[in-house]
Image (cartoon, rainbow, N blue to C red):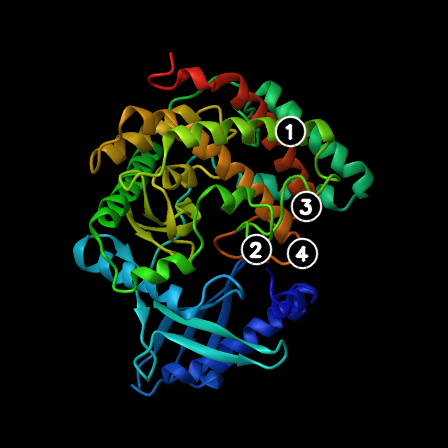
Amino acid sequence: MISAAQQHFNELPLERQKAHFFDVASRALSRWGYDAQSCEITLLNLTENATFRIDCHRSESGRDQRFVMRVHRLDYAQSDSIEVELQWIEELRKVTELRLATPIPGLDGNCIQNIDCPDIGTQRNVVCFTFVSGSAPRDSTDDTESLSKLMLRLASMPDSLTIPLTRGAAMLYDAIGTRGKLNIATTGGGKATTLSPNDERLYRSIGAIAAILRRDSLSWTPTHRADIAHRIEWNWDATFGEQWNNYYGSHYWDIDSMLSRHDIEAIDRCRDLMKRRLKAFGTSPERYGIIHSDLRPANLLDDDGSLAVLDFDDCGLGWYMTDIAGIVGFMEHRPDLPAVLDAIVSGYRTVYPLDEQEEREIPTFIMIRRIGLFESLLYHMTNADPGSNEATTITPELVAFVGKGTAILARKYVRHHRLDDRPGAR
């Protein structure tokens, strides 16, 4: 259940929420030996957590310092479960060559600091990480900026006009596919294209990262293994749980202003089919373990071709194929998605093998992830702020567009993925 403190916080205007996070970040700096008066605090991203870049010019060491601070969301991860995340990052630092943002201990030696929040009657966990250079990688057909500009223009119009328009736009782009620079189709209506060499290298690299994480997860035994159970688990209920304990905080069937009854029913049919397929797929240890769960390019940094992996905040137990699905989040519509997935799988297989059934079910995990992302947009319409890693403002128009596209994708999934295409079910 959502706590009273989180409920109170959710009801605050966005500017009040931002001011609250800045206040917590300022007061937390002393735990790492910094004076807030001599530090510049820059908000990078505000979604589940508030993430800040900290530039301090006079530390106790006498040196300038730059690092990243994460002020945690309430009701999501407690100190014991955050410790699991930090342990895994440290394990990966030791046994892999991945570039990572690693946790920085406070003056008392603890990486996790609890900061009092008297305005909402609770505490927040705060963690600092090393600063990693680079920028989020984008392929040559990335459409985030174009989509953001279009939706911001529509936002100036009354909802009674814009919601039907955005639903219609989703249907139109599904019908005609990608046209020109504005690549915002909701599913592959156009002819699939060949990836550029740079794009193929990017997705092969991310696929290899997903496989490295799986390989390490299978061999790692965390000290705080019992605390993994306190983290979010990326099982069926994470997306479709009836109560608030579904991770995304909202359900696709709750907001009828965004989806028509027929669209909700289409997603229902898709959900039922996916549930039956996943029951057959199973949760054996070879297929289900600790995953990153959000390997979107927005959570990577590219520094002259070297990719760094960020934001393990969502790591927890889940199907390993969820990490492949996460790579293409909000890209499910692209006509060249098969080429993107071919590159990802090719990179993955350079590190770890995929069996036939795992590869066959990748579309299932992509569809689950897509529905979850739509639910996340529903939840964040009033409490997210675009930053360096999230370039699109979450407007009702954007949510309606993504919602209609999700329903279109659900219908296509049901048409193309029957139970009788599973091995042994012929």
Numbered label attached to residue 25 = none
Q: Which is in the foreground here, disc 3 or disc 2?
A: 2
Question: Disc 2 marks which amino acid?
Answer: Pro
Q: Earlier in the sequence, mark 3 or mark 4?
A: 3
Q: CA distance from mark 4 to mark 2?
A: 12 Å
On screen, residue 3 versus residue 419, left or right, reads right
* Residue annotated with mark 1: 170
Please identify the quarter of the rendering in which residue 151 is found.
Answer: top right
Quadrant where the C terminus sits is top left
Say what amino acid the circle numbered 3 marks.
Answer: Leu
Q: Which residue is identified by label 4?
A: 382
Whether residue 246 sits left or right of residue 341 in the image: it is: right
Residue 292 lies left or right of residue 237; in this view the side is left
Q: Which residue corresponds to the image point at 35% horizontal and 84% vertical from the top-left?
A: 59
**First of labels 1, 2 by sequence position:** 1
Q: Residues within 10 Å of mark 3 (few under 14, many from 20)?
A: some
Left or right of residue 97: residue 34: right
Q: Which residue is mark 3?
A: 152
Mark 1 and mark 2 residues within 8 Å of each other at the beta carbon: no
- Real-space CA distance between mark 4 and mark 1, rounded to the nearest whole angstrom: 23 Å
Question: Residue 241, how many percent across, how many down?
Answer: 56, 45
Q: Which mark is residue 386?
A: 2
